[in-house]
Amino acid sequence: MAWEEAKLVAKHEWDEGLYTLTLDRALDFKPGQFVNLGIIIEGKRIKRAYSIGSAPGAPLEFFIVEVDDGALTPRVLNKSIGDTVLVNPRPAGFFTLDYVADARDLWLVSSGTGLAPYISMMRTAEPWQRFERIIVLHGVRYAAQLGYADELRRHAAERPGQLVYIPVVSREPEAPGVVHGRVTSALTDGSLEKLAGRLPDPALDHAMLCGNPAMLDDMQALLEERGMVINRRKKPGQITVERYW
């Protein structure tokens, strides 16, 4: 499928180097999937995959952090409103609810921009219809990096008791309204159990993990200690993991 041009129509800066970009292109996809964006540099197309944060059929939205040595990301973030990028209109990826077995509660664990696929999911009806509760655990370094916090709090207010939003900040011990530490420490120090009412249960729950590799490895190990196992298409389990790199 041919690449297509898309125009940048909105650019929201959450914190230094952390943005949400919106393009004037919509796609049909499964929440949790990604697409490739590209730019032509010296006659060559440079591309990179980004998880989609928007709902299917809405203008494409991406939650992106600047990477100093990245070949594409700094150039994409340097774009101004009205500038264009290339979009491969073929979504890909299996980090979707299609591959999550029915469960009582859904735990959505992320660090940094790993929150994006969950935002896409929660902008559709499916998770709200399938799960009694959704627990969103989002870890960042500084409170200003808690992108989409207002939207998540709005979901929680509109669906009392169905959404539990737990923001975790590692480098600001005095930040109000957040848990101090890392998402993994929240599981082990009692913070998560206190705020969510209980810990993940392999008999009742499914956990999705998305973010930096160290968090994914550590959180997966902690959940496996609780009896949860990795989810595979031929051997279903209770932990689904998306690895960016």
Image (cartoon, rainbow, N blue to C red):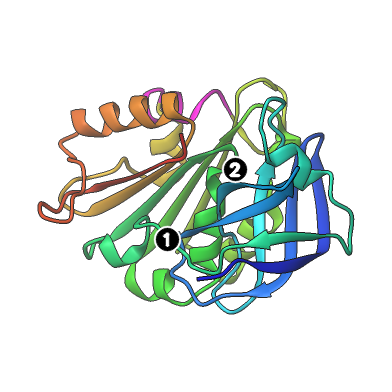
Are the residues flagged by discs 1 and 2 in contact, CB closer than 8 Å? Answer: no
Q: Could you tell whether 240 is left or right of 170 in the image?
A: left
Magenta stretch encompasses residue 163: no
**Relative depth, front residue between 203 and 38:** 38
Q: Does residue 148 appear in this view?
A: no
Q: Mark 1 points at which residue?
A: 92
Q: Residue furthest front?
A: 43
Q: Can you say whether 157 is above or below 181 in the image?
A: below
Magenta stretch: give its range: 180-189
**Relative depth, front residue between 14 and 24:** 24
The residue at 67%/34% (across/down) is 71
Mark 1 packing: few (<14 Cα in 10 Å), some, or many (20+)? Answer: some
Magenta span: predominant SS is helix
The residue at 78%/35% (across/down) is 17
x%, y% of residue 59?
68, 72
Q: What residue type is labelled 1?
A: Ala
Magenta stretch encompasses residue 183: yes
Q: Can you say whether 94 is above or below 158 in the image?
A: above
